[in-house]
Structures are given as structure tokens and as C-alpha cells.
């Protein structure tokens, strides 16, 4: 018998549930493949998206979420997926994957982008330009909090105990206000633009089934906070930060331990510490927890440019900008930051 024809379609309101059913059932899909990211990227950031699916006989065989980020400052790209750690093609078979790959490359040409980018755990196109900038940190959780604490290297474990001895307490927040304050303080000290207050609230609303905000309190005041995503049996602390007291109190160390402890007690079996730029303090911090870095494959097919633009803060040409941004009053930085960060992706 002739197999049913394979067609490439766009996700719409009628197919959203089938899309998410595919994501939750496929072992290689990630939280960042969920349909809700279309709402985040289109409604909050104002970028156009193409959530492509390869289907036959009414069944999804592969998906590829894409978004177009067009900026005079930072370039014109088609990415799977901006503002996310992971993306790329997830497929049940090679034929469906190839169909989406061809469609994405054709779309990139039609749009006239600088490049098409897949953000993946595994390489798909080693012949493309690969940006070896990020590594991710993932590790299985052990059965009990006690076992997980003992699995953390001694020096890092001492920092967690310092936070416990200092009287820090964790609290699940029902809004993102304290998270925004802590996160905005952290990125301002780093000299990088902040996401808007509304962005965090939008994430919490869009992924209300999977989003948790945990604040760390000292003397009744939140000194650090983190927004985590739950996906299947995984916990992903994604946006976190602390005020000036946090380092002295070991609040960030205690915070990530509390995420791990609570996740273990809730039945999670994987802790995904997320990506960090190689060679940064964040990268070293995660290694100190005993996590081994896994290089992320951010593969770029060049279309209208010879090479991807280097928009990373580590680029020396941004050094003066970073120093100046640190000097801005916090309110000014919080007002200007969202207009810049939406163009970066």
C-alpha cells in the first residue's frame, strides 16, 4: 500500500493540543518546544513565528518552532528558538525531519535573513557554522534530598549549609514581583539589559501548569528569587538573581539547593541547570555543583551574511556599553532594557 502523503503545516488554534501532545510524548522534545512559546514570542516580544509540523494521516511526525528576529542593531535571523536554551527539529523519523529542514531553509531564503539557527543538544548539520558559545548542565536527581546534598562537592555543600545556618527560608510566591526585583538587580550589576516586569508575569500566566517562583527570605525580606519550569520529570531553574546581600548570605547557593530539594520531594528525576557561556562565572558556579558541561550545538546556515554577528556580552566591543549601563540609575535601566533585549533573542 502507498504510505499516506507527508505535508508540512503551521500550528494553529485547532492543532495546538496535538502539538503539545507530541512534545510531551517525544523523549527528545524539551520545555522550549511547547506551543506556549508562540504566544510569548509573538504577543510579548512582537516577533513573527512559524511553528512547523510534518504530518501524515492526521498524525504529527515532526515539529520545528521558528521565530524571526529582525533588528537594525543585532541582525536579522530565523531561530529555533529565541530566548530559549533548546530548539530545533524533533522528529519520529528521518523523512519528516528532512521535510521540515528543507522548509526551514527555504523560508530563510524567502525572508532574506542573515542566517537560520537551530539550538540543539545534538548536532544535525556539522557542515554549518557552529557557535560554540554555550554549554548546558543536566544531571539525574537521586532518590532523596539527603543523597542529593551529599552528591554536591564539599565546598559547594558548605555554602548551602552556610545559608541554612544563617536562617534563610524559601517561600513559593504567587506572583513575579519579588523575582523581578531580584533579577533586575543582578543583571544591572552585570551591565546587561533586563527583561520587563511584564515578561515574567506573562511567562507565569502562559505556563501556569509548569511555572514556579521561589524566593529566599532573610529577616522577612526576599534577597534572591528564581523562576523554574517543570517539564515531565525535569526541573529547570531558568531566571534567577539576588540583591547585594545575596552573596554574603549564600542566598543563591541556598536557593538552588531549595529548588533541587523541593523538586526531588515532588518526584522530579532530572535537574536542568540551564545554559551558561563558557568561561563565565555562571559556568564555573554550575561546575562547582558537580555538574558536567554539555556543549550546545547552535548551528547556523548562512543566508545573507558571511558569519553570525557576535552579540555576546563577552565581545570586547561591548565593554564600554557594559560599563556605562552599570552606571545608569536602576529605574532608567529597567525602562530601557526591555527595548534592547527583545532584539537579541
Image (cartoon, rainbow, N blue to C red):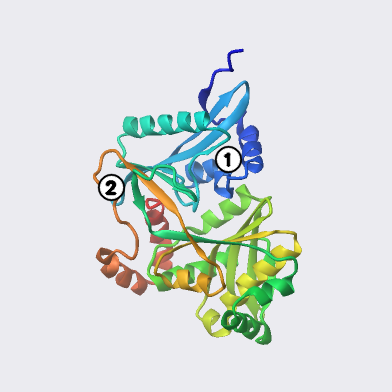
304 horizontally vs 227: left or right: left
For residue 254, which numbered disc appears in the image?
none
Q: Quadrant of residue 110?
A: top left
Judging by the rendered image, the residue that carries numbered circle 1 is 35
Q: Position of residue 181 (x, y in %)?
A: 53, 68
For the residues carrying marks 1 and 2, which lies nearer the camera in this image? 1
Judging by the rendered image, the residue that carries numbered circle 2 is 72
Is 27 in front, or is 55?
27
Q: CA distance from mark 1 to mark 2?
A: 28 Å
Q: Residue at x 70, y 69 (%)?
A: 261
114 horizontally vs 32: left or right: left
- Residue 287 visible in rendering: yes
Q: Residue furthest front?
A: 1
105 horizontally vs 35: left or right: left
Helix, strand or loop for disc 2: loop
Is 71 in front, or is 81?
81
Q: Quadrant of residue 134?
A: bottom left
Helix, strand or loop for disc 1: loop
Q: Position of residue 299 (x, y in %)?
A: 39, 47
Q: Position of residue 143 (x, y in %)?
A: 74, 65
Is 142 in front, or is 73?
142
Q: Quadrant of residue 264?
A: bottom right
In the rendered view of the protein, which quadrant contains the N terminus? top right
Q: Position of residue 266 (x, y in %)?
A: 75, 61
Tell me: residue 159, above or below residue 128.
Answer: below
Amino acid at each position: 500500500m502507498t504510505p499516506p502523503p507527508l505535508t508540512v503545516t503551521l500550528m494553529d488554534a485547532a492543532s495546538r493540543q496535538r502539538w503539545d501532545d507530541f512534545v510531551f510524548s517525544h523523549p527528545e522534545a524539551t520545555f522550549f518546544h511547547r506551543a506556549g512559546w508562540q504566544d510569548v514570542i509573538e504577543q510579548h516580544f512582537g516577533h513573527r513565528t512559524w511553528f512547523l509540523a510534518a504530518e501524515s494521516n492526521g498524525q504529527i511526525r515532526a515539529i520545528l518552532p521558528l521565530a524571526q528576529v529582525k533588528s537594525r542593531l543585532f541582525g536579522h535571523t530565523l531561530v529555533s528558538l529565541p530566548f530559549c536554551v533548546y530548539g530545533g527539529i524533533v522528529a519520529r523519523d528521518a523523512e519528516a525531519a528532512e521535510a521540515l529542514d528543507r522548509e526551514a531553509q527555504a523560508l530563510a531564503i524567502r525572508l532574506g535573513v542573515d542566517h537560520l539557527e537551530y539550538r540543539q543538544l545534538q548536532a544535525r548539520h556539522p557542515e554549518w557554522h557552529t557557535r560554540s558559545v554555550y554549554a548546558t548542565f543536566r544531571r539525574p536527581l537521586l532518590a532523596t534530598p539527603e543523597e542529593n546534598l551529599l552528591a554536591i562537592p564539599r565546598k559547594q555543600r558548605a555554602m548551602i549549609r552556610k545559608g541554612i545556618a544563617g536562617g534563610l527560608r524559601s517561600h513559593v510566591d504567587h506572583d513575579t514581583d519579588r523575582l523581578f526585583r531580584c533579577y533586575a538587580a543582578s543583571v544591572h550589576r552585570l551591565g546587561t539589559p533586563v527583561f520587563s516586569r511584564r515578561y515574567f508575569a506573562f511567562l507565569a500566566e502562559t505556563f501556569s501548569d509548569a511555572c514556579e517562583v521561589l524566593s529566599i527570605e532573610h529577616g522577612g525580606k526576599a534577597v534572591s528569587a528564581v523562576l523554574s519550569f517543570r517539564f515531565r520529570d525535569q526541573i529547570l531553574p531558568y531566571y534567577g538573581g539576588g540583591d547585594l546581600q545575596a552573596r554574603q548570605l549564600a542566598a543563591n547557593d541556598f536557593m538552588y539547593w531549595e529548588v533541587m530539594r523541593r523538586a526531588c520531594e515532588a518526584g522530579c528525576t532530572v535537574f536542568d541547570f540551564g545554559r551558561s557561556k563558557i568561561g563565565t562565572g555562571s559556568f564555573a558556579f554550575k561546575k562547582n555543583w558537580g555538574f558536567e558541561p554539555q556543549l550546545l550545538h547552535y548551528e547556523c546556515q548562512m543566508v545573507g551574511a558571511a558569519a553570525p554577528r557576535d552579540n555576546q556580552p563577552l565581545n570586547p566591543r561591548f565593554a564600554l556599553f557594559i560599563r556605562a549601563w552599570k552606571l545608569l540609575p536602576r529605574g532608567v535601566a529597567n525602562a530601557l532594557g526591555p527595548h534592547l533585549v527583545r532584539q537579541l533573542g
